[in-house]
Amino acid sequence: MLEAVRSRSFDKLFYRYNYHYLIRRHFRYFGVAGELQPPSIEGRPVLYIMNHSSWWDGLLAYHAARTLTNRVHYFMMEEEQLRKYAFFRKLGAYSMNRHSTGDISASLRYTSRLLRAGGSVWMYPEGEIQPLEHRPMVLKAGAGLVLRLCPEAVVVPVTLYHGLFRHPKPEATLLAGVPLAHSWKDMNRNSIGDELQTVLEEQLNNHRQMIINNGGYVPEQFQPLMKQGRSTNEWFDAVLGRRRR
């Protein structure tokens, strides 16, 4: 497996590039609701679990975590992709090769070491990109095994819902759910997996319903994490509105 090789200077540079160029260029809106770092988890290892529906998931989660928390974050990433984009290791990414039993074991042990050392770790327990509306969600056993190795960890479920709603560019919303602080050592990996799967799927369904109930507009409880410019249709509306006056 490939371990993280964090670089503070590179992280500082990439954070600006990710915000000013990547996110602002490709999204009309990115906002967050809920607390990524609630007071109740202070001093506890934190495992973030998130649905995985696009190539952008890691970059959006990285921006939210970097902006809204003061913790050191690590991100599990598929090894083939991390070898291709090796610079992500400097941001805290490390690999999981799901085709190798030995590598899976090494990655999960490494994850538990990061948690016990005070790091916060992001996992995508579906194991691969799935369509946003894919149901039922099926989670791999990895997160359950990590929690058995580090039972003092708190789980924060995070869902990302995105789409082309009312503008030419997509809008993305990140929702942090209620932290889970169970007695993981008293649960087996299957019962842990069932619990995480139920919580994450219900949260994603509720997240989607929030958007639907608001007519495709971003609900007010989401706070923007990027400066918004006008989208193409908003420029058209502004120009046509001026001509009509």
Image: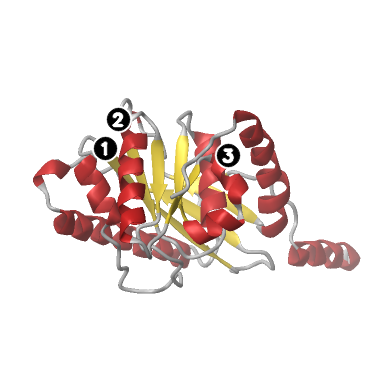
The residue type indicated by label 2 comes to: Arg
Display colour scheme: secondary structure
| Mark pair 3, 1: CA separation | 24 Å
Question: Of the residues under marks 1 and 2, which one precedes in the sequence?
Answer: 2
Residue under label 2 = 44
Residue that label 3 marks: 90
Is residue 177 visible to us here? no
Residue occupied by mark 1? 153
Q: Is 62 rendered above or below residue 9?
A: below
Quick one: label 2, few (<14), some, or many (20+) residues within 10 Å? Answer: some
What is the secondary structure assignment of the residue under circle 3?
helix
Between the C-alphas of marks 1 and 2, the distance is 6 Å
| Residue occupying the point 46% across, 43% down | 3
Q: Position of residue 59 (x, y in %)?
A: 57, 50
* Earlier sequence position, callout 3 versus callout 2: 2
Three-letter amino acid code at the position of disc 1:
Ala
Q: SS of the residue at dot 2?
A: loop
Circle 1: element type? loop
State which mark lies toward you, 3 or 2.
Answer: 3
Taking 154 as reference, is 192 above or below it? below
